[in-house]
Image (spheres, coloured by chain):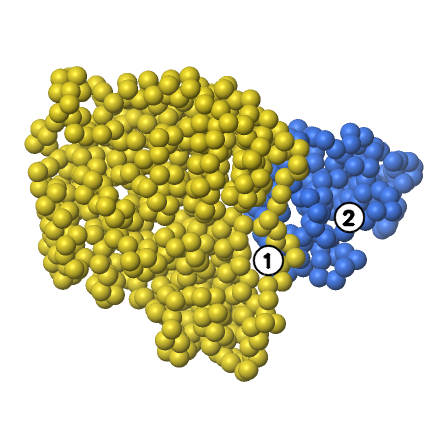
Chain colours: A blue, B yellow
Amino acid sequence: MPKHILVAYVEDKPGVLNRVASLFRRRAFNIDSLTVGRTEQEGVSRMTIVVDTDEVTARRIEANLYKLVNVLRVDDVTNKPAVVRDLALVKVSAANGKRAEILQLADVFRARVVDIEERSLMLEVTGSEDKIEGLIKVLQPFGIIEMVRTGIVAMARGAEAVSPNPPTVAAQLAEPGNGEATPAGLAMSV
Amino acid sequence: MKLTGAEIVWECLVREGVNVIFGYPGGAILPTYDAMTKYPQIHHVLVRHEQGATHMADGYARASGRVGTAIATSGPGATNMVTGIATAMMDSSPIVCITGQVGSKAIGSDAFQETDVTGVTLPITKHNYLVTRPEDIARTLREAFYIASSGRPGPVLVDITKDAQQLTADFDWEAAAPRLPGYRPHLRSLPSEYQRAIELINSAKRPLIFAGQGVIKSGATRIVLELAEKAQIPIAMTLLGIGGIPASHPLNLGMMGMHGEAWVNMAIQQADLLIACGMRFDDRVTGNLKTYAPNARKIHIEIDPSEVNKNVRVDAALLGDLRCVLEEIVPHIQPADHEEWLEHIQEMKGDSAVRDIQHLPDNGHLYAAHVINDMWRLTRDVDPIVVTDVGQHQMWEAQYFRHEQPRSLITSGGLGTMGFALPAAIGAKFARPDKEVWVIAGDGGFQMTMAELATVVQEGLKLNIAIINNAYLGMVRQWQEFFYEKRYAATPLLGPDFVKLADAFGLKGIRVTRRSEVRAAVEEARAHPGTVVIDFQVEQEDSVFPMVPAGADLHNMIRRPKPKVNVLAETGADVEWEMPR
């Protein structure tokens, strides 16, 4: 099933993350990743939620998110031109003179070396999920000791900001799949 | 004005128009109970179990359309409320539950009677709050009442720590107006949706209106009937929609779904357009979704956007308050007569009439359907409020008691909560002291909450309680009969002597075992000034028909068995019983 990327502005109050997570559990919507962080506006947090689901269910998720009193705004950026980024830290084994080879690969993926040790090194890589998957794949033969990923954060391109203020018409429900079809934000940008 | 948090609670309740609150005191809510003595304008009803308090608030809300209020202490007091809150959530009933919580410093320490109540009730409330400071109480309660009653109504729980109740704060009602930037109860669909809906209605050949609870909640009876009459569209009701459309209206077909009448379900399967008004396509009304209304386009008029396309994909969705939406649409609907369609449905009715239990002569057995239909005949002069429990009697009531007024049937539909009837009836009586209130409950459900009889006595209420007693958990027994080869695992049920039980509470008890005694018992109960319990000892292994087995196609009903003698044909004019709808 296709991935949907929803951006939700929520009130920064205790328990809000729990409410959102509980909604997904309760309605059996499958979360791929969920990230939360502060925004430019005080008291407002921004969540990027990635779900594996069809278009109609994505609309239902959006409607259910809106039902939560603490959710200010939901925006589906799946089909919008958007920058979509995941960040990973990968600790990879660099024994037996493999370091140079790894550094070369890191360079191709524009990964940064953030820690270096006699038999290992740590890479930091930012990019689309595909790019990170690609790096992980080529690093695997060397032996990945430890890895962490943040999950996706996304932002629509252009000067317009998705403001936390609610949209004037929040109910274009009956016509699923009427967004732009160019998944520009999902293209690899290595 | 400096007040304690406890006093602020009551100041807010008074301003929200609360005149009765159902509750049970305890340690963590004691400061609030102590302050209650200063507010005699709010009547407190001491319940026997906190579940009862929530059902009472729910019954109050459903009978009046206002917000019902319940109060309990922390821990077990609050967890006992869970069933009632879930019941209110499933049936969109506006209630506000206030619970005490241990002191804010003790939260998380597993203190005595500490439970994470906001965590427990998160999925079964429309919204909930934990309040730890007295200065937050007023705004929170104002928001709670607003959220509970606006948009799609529902339960809101406010958990207040003991120290927040004890400490003082400035109380300023005006300044504590709700601040809910993310709450949008009033949504609207795009004009194109309206256009599409109007076109669908105007071009339909076999349309059907579905009347759900939204008709009652929105006060849309008049405008739904206007639509139906203008274009001659028959109406089918959900269980919770009963009362929203008068049973006697010629276009009202009756209840749909698992125990709906055969002609209603057949009409749904044959319709080319469903106009769903304030209902949510519950599995109990649709049966198998794959074969549901296969020829019908669907219009969904619904206040909650998350219900749209949830169970049934629709062709047009009109969001908003049902009455407002219909008022915009109806002027654009062209008059029609749909003569062929209505005649066809009428023919299907005739086939069912032959099987109707009402046409069986009195054979010495006491059938629940007869009892309930007799109760309707004997009380129809006042159109009483009937509060039913859950099970066979609930379905027989829906089939054989004909409701003419909105809010005259109160029942737990979505959650199917046994034990609901008696406490909900207490709440309904407080909401409508002018109305005659009947409880119809099975012997199983009644035994779940019968301790509330003590509340009835303590409050000096007048209820009429009919126990449809078949000494079985009847609906479960019916499923065992149909689907588990009559293995009656744990369904035979020993009950007390309900007449003696009534007597023990100082109430009047009547036992009925024959049909000929029904009239006298009902009349005696109505004439008696106090609450009366009637123990109707009915046929034990009777079943509710028609029945769509769970998950089966809506048209594949288990029909009522055809009687050996066609009483209609044999007796002709002597048949005094009219069709249930």
Q: Are marks 2 and 1 on the same chain?
A: yes
Residue at 63% in and 39% down: B189
Question: Which label is found at residue A15?
Answer: 1
Quarter of image, res B416: top left
Q: Which residue is mark 2?
A: A162
Whether residue B17 is visible, yes or no, is yes
Quadrant of the rendering where the C terminus of chain A is positioned = top right
Instruction: Tell me: B449 left or right of A113.
Output: left
Residue B392, image x and y in percent? 26, 37
Instruction: Tell me: B11 left or right of B254.
Output: right
Q: Residue furthest bottom?
A: B2
* Foreground residue among A104 and A118: A104
Residue B482, image x and y in percent? 27, 25
Quadrant of the rendering where the N terminus of chain A is positioned = top right
Quarter of image, res B368: top left
Whole-number angstrom distance, CA of label 2 to CA of label 1:
24 Å
